[in-house]
Image (cartoon, grey):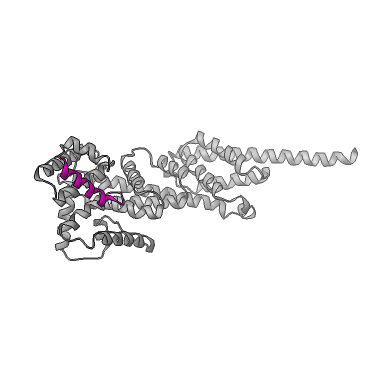
Amino acid sequence: MAITPLGFGSRIVSSSHEKSRSSKTSDDSDEVLRGQGVIDSAGEYASMSMLAASHVKKSGSKQGETEDWMQFAERILDEHADETILHVESALNRQFMTPKELRAFLLRFFADPSDLLMALAALINRGKLKAEQLEQLKELEQQLNAEDSDRSTQAGINIALVAKAFAQKIKQSAGNLRMLYREFLSYDGPVVYLYEQWVEEMESQERENIMRYLSRALACDLQALPLGDINISEFGDYFLRVGRLRELQSLEHVFTQQFFQSGLFRQHSQLINSEFAKKLSQLFTSGIRNQAQFEENLLLFISSQLGAMSTDLRARFLQLLILAFGTIPTAIFQSLEAREELLNQLKIYMDYVKAQEEIMMRNGLLNKEQKPHE
């Protein structure tokens, strides 16, 4: 993928100057352009406000060009980035370094390429180094831009503030969220596989927060690209991918509610806990994705979660399972045939369980009839 011809540093600076000349507005698009995304809840607004307050506290006493370089430093996912930049600047004033030496030296403080590029931009913008050293910094900056063939470095810069804000809510580090966004962009497999992985690793609310984060990050990343950038065309697929993930989350909720709101589980509410809910979600994803894996998961679920139930109640659970999968649109399955095969297998298994229950009942009656004659 091609990289935007406008450098990271110059793009952010020019955007900042253009916005300062334009009239101020309070709509969501401006929030997105500032790298914050659309704020649609009090909790998110509070997170953004805390970030803004933190930035004001650190830079309120600084004016002019100092404020310009801070816009680069705040995109570095290290709370001590500004102090580190000043430390690096002091070292470079004492010792001249070539681009190769600069890279090795700066990587000791800024291991992530996005952080490294923003550190370079901040040092260049401050302009406190000798002209010869600044030229070396600019050369390294150009090298890093040229190496960013998959746009992961640029994307990491564009969504840094969003990652910082959501880190407070999701309880993950901003660095992990930045990496998650990059992995999301590079993922090229079926969406259901990705969702299945999330079900394994996260609770429902965390998955919801991750999807909101990805939506917000995509909006910020897209807004940061200049008009005509070749990469803009890819964002349609990214947003569709998030939409598909949200659809799966919604359908999973509908699926699980078929059980939680049923008379069977209202009478056996002691069975419902976080582990039960997670296993039920895994049944949902394996059912729409992989028939062989679903059969294994179903048997494991029944033995581990429903072991205390009678055969009759297990049959009722299977009936609920058939109804729950019946509510899922055909398009969610790999094919119409896969959906029909799944439902048919469940019906066969349910009939088998019912037959087992009838055999047990008949044996019980025979035992009762034989006892009086003994």
Pick out the residue farthest to the front. Answer: 94
In the image, is 270 to the left or to the right of 324?
right
On the image, which quarter does residue 168 sit in? bottom left
Pick out the residue farthest to the left. Answer: 131
Which x, y percent locates residue 362?
76, 40
Query: Residue at left 47%, top 42%?
Result: 200
Pick out the residue farthest to the top. Answer: 292
Which segment did they paint magenta? 78-95
Relative to 359, is 210 above or below? below
Q: Can residue 75 be seen in this view?
A: no
Relative to 23, is 336 above or below? above
Query: Considering the image in quadrants, where does the C terminus appear?
Result: top right
On the image, which quarter does residue 101 sit in? top left
Residue 80 highlighted magenta (yes or no): yes
Q: Is the magenta stretch mostly helix, strand or loop?
A: helix
Residue 4 highlighted magenta (yes or no): no
Which x, y percent locates residue 198?
43, 44
In the image, is 260 to the left or to the right of 81?
right
